[in-house]
Image (cartoon, rainbow, N blue to C red):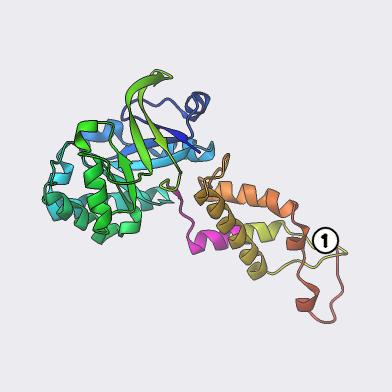
Amino acid sequence: MTYLVADFAYGRPGSAALKNAGYSGVVRYLSSSPNARTKIVDAGEIEDYLTNGLALFLVYETGTSDAWSGYYGGQQNAKYVQKFMAQHGIKGPVFFSVDRDSGNPIFSGIYEYFQGIRDVLGAQNVGAYAGDNVLQALMDDGLIAYRWRTGASSWNHGSHGPTDMNQQVGSHTVNGTYVDVNTASNLNGRVTVLLSPDDINAIAQKVHDLVKADTDAIRADVGTVAAHTKDLIDGDYRNQAAGQEGFKPFPTVGAAVARLQKQVANLPTINATPSSVRPANRRPTSD
């Protein structure tokens, strides 16, 4: 299956307009430069996209010379990304831009730049936007896990392997915003909400508080509900990784609780502590 993914630096078309235009995902920008603030994705956008079922991809780009800033530059940019992700409660890979022709063979400093990024984030959390030869070289060196091919064909220097996302030539307007069009074979490089163990325990406690004892069931203990809660969350992440259409990841802990309330209502087995672990000599009582 092929997905359409919109890429834009300026403007805010909104998830509804993007979905109506046929897009399944969106690429938005990160940058540590104060001069780039107008193109950086904000918290409201993140919640809009994730709540309304658009896959969100992130790319770090301040300018066309980012990848020429060496190991230290890569580390600094990756540390900014790491902090941004933590502050916004999201996790997943981030693409880093090589936004000009790097030659063939490629400029050696690009390896150093991505080594700095990898040493902060881990290669499994790093993607690159670049020409084909750069993508293949970085993949071969274990520096990236995701490949986004530029639409500038002269930068590719031949075809060197499969990619996760391909930028198409040309753009069009969605709700007053110019967007570049990309095609993706999967949505695996998207970000998701980060739920910490404390978040999961808080959700479990809130769900537990909803489970009332009656004549047929004794209230489940928090640990039992926490285990079910984690299974539900893990199941959602598996569905997301598989690119299930219509899947909406949790944008906030509150949204997770709201969805789990509905799931608990449809799973009566969660509403009771198994008889094998019920307290001895206790009669079921109703609230």
Residue 10: image quadrant is top left
Residue 9: image quadrant is top left
Q: Position of residue 36 (x, y in %)?
A: 23, 34
Q: Position of residue 232 (x, y in %)?
A: 61, 57
- Amino acid type, mark 1: Asp
- Judge whether 272 appears above or below 190 on screen: below
SS for dot 1: loop
Q: Return the residue nearer the eye: 10 or 34.
A: 10
Q: Return the residue nearer the eye: 195 or 192.
A: 192
Identify the residue position indicated by label 1 in the image. Answer: 287
- Judge whether 148 appears above or below 116 on screen: above
Q: Which residues are magenta?
A: 192-203
Name the residue at 22% across, 38% down: 156
Q: Return the residue nearer the eye: 71 or 184.
A: 184
Name the residue at 34% across, 49% down: 146
Residue 138 visible somewhere in the drawing: yes
Relative to residue 245, is residue 68 drawn left or right?
left
Relative to residue 2, is residue 130 drawn left or right?
left
Name the residue at 71% across, 54% down: 264
